Amino acid sequence: MSKQANFSDTFLQEAEELLVSVEERILDVETNPHDKEAINGLFRAMHTIKGSGAMFGFDEISRFTHHVETALDLVREGKLRVSKQLIDLTLASRDQIKSMLDEARGNGKASRATAQEIVDAFVRLAPNDKRMTTAPCGILETRPSMLSRNKTYRIRFTPHRNIFATGMDPSLIVEELGGLGACVVTLQLNNLPALCDMDPEACYLAFDMVLTTQHELNEIHDVFIFVEDVSEISVDEISLRELDDVPKLGEILLDRGVVTKKSLDTALSKQERVGNILSAQGEVSPDQIDAALAEQSVLRQKKESMVEESVKVPAGKLDRLINLVGELVITQEQLKIASAQMSAADLATQVEEIGRLTGELRDIALNVRMMPIGGTFNRFKRLVRDLSLELGKKIKLDTYGEDTEMDKTVIDRLGDPLVHLIRNSLDHGIESPEERAQKGKPEFGTICLSARHQGARIVVSIEDDGKGLNPAVIKQKAVEKGLVDADRPMTEQQIFELIMEPGFSTAQTVTSVSGRGVGMDVVKREIAALRGAIDIKSKLDEGTTISLGLPLTLAIIEGLLVEVGESKYIIPVALVEECLEMSAANRAMDKERNLLTVRGAIIPYVRLRDVFVEKGRRTATEEAIIIENGGRSFGIVVDHVVGQHQTVIKSLGPMYRHIKGLSGATIMGDGSVALIIDVGQILQIAGNQEDYRLNSTRRFEGEPKDVRDACWMT
Amino acid sequence: MAKKIMSADDSPSMRQMVSFTLKEAGYEVVEACDGKDALDKLKTEKIDMLITDLNMPNMDGLELIRQMRQLPEYKFIPVIMLTTESDESKKNAGKSAGATGWLVKPFNPPQLTAVVKKVLR
């Protein structure tokens, strides 16, 4: 840095000039030991060399000069006599400093031994003086600001009456506090005299503040550093933890020491607004009331925001609300149809208006239950930190998709399974720092929590870069526990799924962190209860990714209404890429394999008619709906695509939840029932379609119809 | 309008550093080499803040502060003393003389600008 070099040069020059004057002055003092001017000059010279030296990086020179400077200061104060020894030492110091300056300029080397001798000699001159025996310190680096949890403080600042005379503007202090966080300021004017009695150069104001900040307490105190010895300052934390309810005004006034319990009780017994009474009683000034009210307001907001995070509304109430909204939407659709048939213009406008209002109501009702998953994610940061410390591993947690919104009930129930999965990653997944170093992995293991929309589902993933799952070990264990036959061929996917079987645990030691092997099967059950699915991907030594696919069960979605035989189905529009007619060529193709070509690409497909074993023959024309799922496309072939339709999802009752391929049902405008397709499961079914064809096509017969009937009951 | 700060110090390297740092931060700077020089310059310059060393020839920092505070237009401007750790006792003397605050030498440029921001609007 050229400017830095500049300062150094200036300093070196300055120091050299000072040394010249030092030499002259020492000789003066030698002649006249009481020459105050010379002694002061000497002191100042050394003082400057020491101070400026430290400023510009010449620490060694600064440290050395400290002792001679101290000695001269003692002489100034009359605590040390001017002796021959002192003169000699001072001259020696001057020479030493000169050679150190020369060394800094690149001329020769200064003797450290000589320096030490001189320092020791000075110390012997005044062995009891603390300043002589302590070394000076260099630039004190300001500690970086440490942020922690939000805390709320009650701060009272009463500036000294004459504060203006020291050039301090108290409002700057208040502003500086405001820079630390949200600060509500109430001015206290009770000391303000009448205008005729007021001294315009005096400060009669006091400031009551409620500050909410993540900064540490000492940072708050630092704000007052220039005024704390003359002004009144108090900083008290207001603990919100004990708050069951926002404290009442009277309680706060009591807490602030503004009123006595007796006054408060008297006031309360008169059943009027506490603030007014106390003010009327003359015991409390309106400003003090305002300040207390300000505190109450801040606390109320804090409480509300806290309450917001943990609002408990009986799920039943919300369900009923949303159900009703759903019914409203359906009824409104029926109204639309009926009104169209009646062709009465006035009616049409009103019906349209109802449609608009219903739409808005529907959106808000849905929104009530939707919450960003971020809140849940944040819980885990602390968990990961604490557990990784306990386990002696270095782990960091990344999160993505915190804004992804999900139904609140789903989020709530997702908490425990996620905790368990994360604990598993921490405990069994991420290796110890030594192991990781051996494998050439970064010291810190990473767990990545993410949430994203995928069509009509939310996918929550826990991905770690730990040691991954070992299929061989898992299979071995499963065989030992009698869960599978040793010789049964299994895909890697199937082996991974074994870890979710009850009573399975490959952990060498069961730690306090992850508990026994009951975990994964419980997780599986809980996710299944949410109508979700677990997908496990893993690569040995690279890591594991567990994905939870969760449906939006009670929501209203945009769907594509299709007909297959006499049945109606809904396919979530979000997943649909395009619809096209099954050309004669494509239909001809499907003798052996269900494949169709779309613009040169070959895409496998399923025929809903086959999946759900629809009665009757294939129709003359068919349409294919191309679905994008997990990066790959496939087709669902139906008889006819009716069009887009807004759907209120009703879940299939408990009896039918296990049916694969369906994620819910809906009631159409005309009262009939349409089944909502679970695209992911259809894919699975299609994959096993060969099996089904061979084994039991009869499996689905009769069931869909029962399900449809069952819908009427729910 | 940029605020004008006076830097009073008998060490040219100090003045240079203070001057450079404050100019970089957007302030105007007037330099003085001791208390007497400072008071002289105040006759013709209007400043918004004073940063002064305590140990200076001709007139030291404390005396400068005392005399400056007598001038009506400088009764209320912020004044920062540059002290070294051995001058702890001087802090109180400075306060009595009318100083607003202090900065301990040695310090780095960010610390200097932080203190200025603390006391100068």
Image: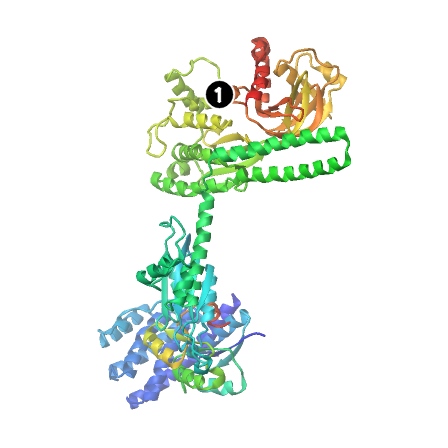
- Closer to the camera in the image, A236 or B73: A236
Which chain is indicated by disc 1? Answer: A
- Foreground: A195 or A546? A195
The colour mode here is: rainbow
**In which quadrant will I find the C terminus of chain A?**
top right
Residue A266 pos. (x, y %): 34, 61
User: Is A466 above or below relative to A667?
Assistant: below
Determine the residue positioned at 36% across, 86% down: A24
Left or right of B109 in this view: A128: left
Compared with A437, B46 (above or below) is below
Name the spot of residue A494 as percent of width and height, x first.
48, 20
Q: Residue furthest front?
A: A270
Name the foreground residue: A15 vs B37: B37
**Residue B83 in which image quadrant:** bottom left
> How many circles with numbers are drawn on the protein?
1
Q: Residues within 10 Å of mark 1 (few under 14, many from 20)?
A: few
- Residue drawn at point x = 48 percent, y = 73 percent: B18
The answer to whether residue A141 shows anywhere in this view is no
Kindly indicate the quadrant of the structure image that contains residue A116: bottom left
Q: Secondary structure at mark 1?
A: helix
Amino acid type at circle 1 is: Gln
Q: Residue at x 68, y 16 (%)?
A: A565
Would residue B68 appear left or right of A31 to someone viewing this image?
A: right
Q: Which residue is mark 1?
A: A494
- Res. A225 in view: yes
Task: Determine whether B41 is above or below A278 in the image.
Answer: below
